[in-house]
Image (cartoon, rainbow, N blue to C red):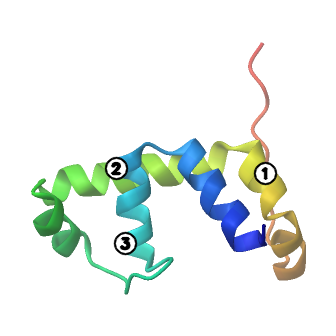
Amino acid sequence: MNKKDIANKGLKNLLTETEYDVLVRHLGLLYYEPMSLTEIAKFTGESKETTRRRKVSALDKLRESPEVRELFKDFIKEEGINTHDKKEKN
């Protein structure tokens, strides 16, 4: 399994089906061209605001996921991206 397949499987496990679909379409991942939130909303039959909330929710989950940080740690190091871990709540 290559890194792309692993990343895709990780996203599917972490996000709801609708969050995954919105993010993949909006970012132009896999075989999609990037779509605007308005285009995605028309496609799904939801409002643009609902679509925006799904995108925000998906991105929040990705930011907070230790699994995602682990998966992209090489990219983060190569790009010099600074990640700030939130302190764990007891």
Q: Evaluate if marks 1 and 2 touch, with contact meaning CB atoms under 8 Å apart.
A: no
Closer-to-camera residue (86/75): 75
Instruction: State the image coordinates of residue 20 (x, y, percent, origin top left).
Output: 44, 55
- What amino acid type should be assigned to the residue bearing mark 3? Arg
Name the residue that disc number 2 marks: 18
Which mark is first along the chain, 2 or 1?
2
Name the residue that disc number 3 marks: 25
Q: Residue at x 37, y 72 (%)?
A: 26
- In the structure shown, which secondary structural element does the residue marked by tag 1 occupy? loop
- Circle 3 packing at 10 Å, graded few (<14), some (14-19), many (20+), is some
- What amino acid type should be assigned to the residue bearing mark 1? His
Q: Residue at x 58, y 54 (%)?
A: 11
The residue most toward the top is 90
Instruction: State the image coordinates of residue 43 (x, y, percent, origin top left).
Output: 15, 67
Q: Evaluate if marks 3 and 2 touch, with contact meaning CB atoms under 8 Å apart.
A: no
Which mark is first along the chain, 2 or 3?
2
Instruction: State the image coordinates of residue 16 (x, y, percent, origin top left).
Output: 43, 42
Q: CA distance from mark 1 to mark 2?
A: 28 Å
**Quarter of the figure with the N terminus:** bottom right
> Is 58 displayed left or right of 89 in the figure?
left
Query: Which numbered circle lies on residue 84?
Result: 1
Closer-to-camera residue (27/32): 32
- What amino acid type should be assigned to the residue bearing mark 2? Thr
**Quarter of the figure with the C terminus:** top right
- In the structure shown, which secondary structural element does the residue marked by tag 2 occupy? helix
